[in-house]
Amino acid sequence: MNEQCKKLARIVGESESGAILEVIVQPGSKREGIEVMDGEVIVRVREPPSEGRANDALIRLFRKKLKLKASIIAGAKSRKKKLLVGNASPEQVIEAICKTIT
């Protein structure tokens, strides 16, 4: 596990329903993707932030790239969001993210 992935433990929590993950979304990006920078998960989506389109793209990207089902539980109108990753442990979320970025 690289150094960036080790830092993820501080932003991935646990709840009864699954893992809680903090992400920063960059809507309107030229390319889609997930990266870890300075211990934060940055998610780039092509869609604009209007009418919840960037939020929908975020959820689709998690399902497609990480094979995880996520829902936004805080920050729906902000770039900084909290996601509930259902039926997954924090370790599983970290592992999925790290496999995607390495």
Image (spheres, grey):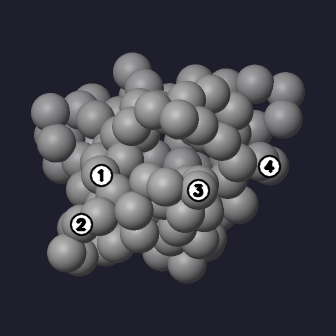
Q: Earlier in the sequence, mark 1 or mark 4?
A: 1
Q: Residue at x 28, y 35 (%)?
A: 40
**Residue sitting at the far right:** 16
Is residue 10 in view? yes
- Mark 4, residue position: 87
Foreground mark, 2 or 4? 2
Is residue 34 in view? no
Q: Residue at x 39, y 21 (%)?
A: 10
Residue 20 percent location from the top left of the image: 62, 32
Q: Is residue 32 left or right of residue 62?
A: left
Callout 2: SS: loop
Residue 45 percent location from the top left of the image: 36, 66
Callout 3: SS: helix
Q: Is residue 22 left or right of residue 40?
A: right
Between the residue at mark 2 and the residue at mark 4, the CA separation in whole angstroms equals: 30 Å
User: Mark 3 Cα within 10 Å, few/some/many (few <14, many 20+)?
Assistant: few
Residue 33, by quadrant, is bottom left
- Mark 1, residue position: 26
Q: Amino acid at mark 3?
A: Glu
Q: Amino acid at mark 1?
A: Gln
- Mark 2, residue position: 29
Which is more toward the observer, 19 or 34? 34
Q: Are marks 2 and 1 in contact (CB under 8 Å)?
A: yes
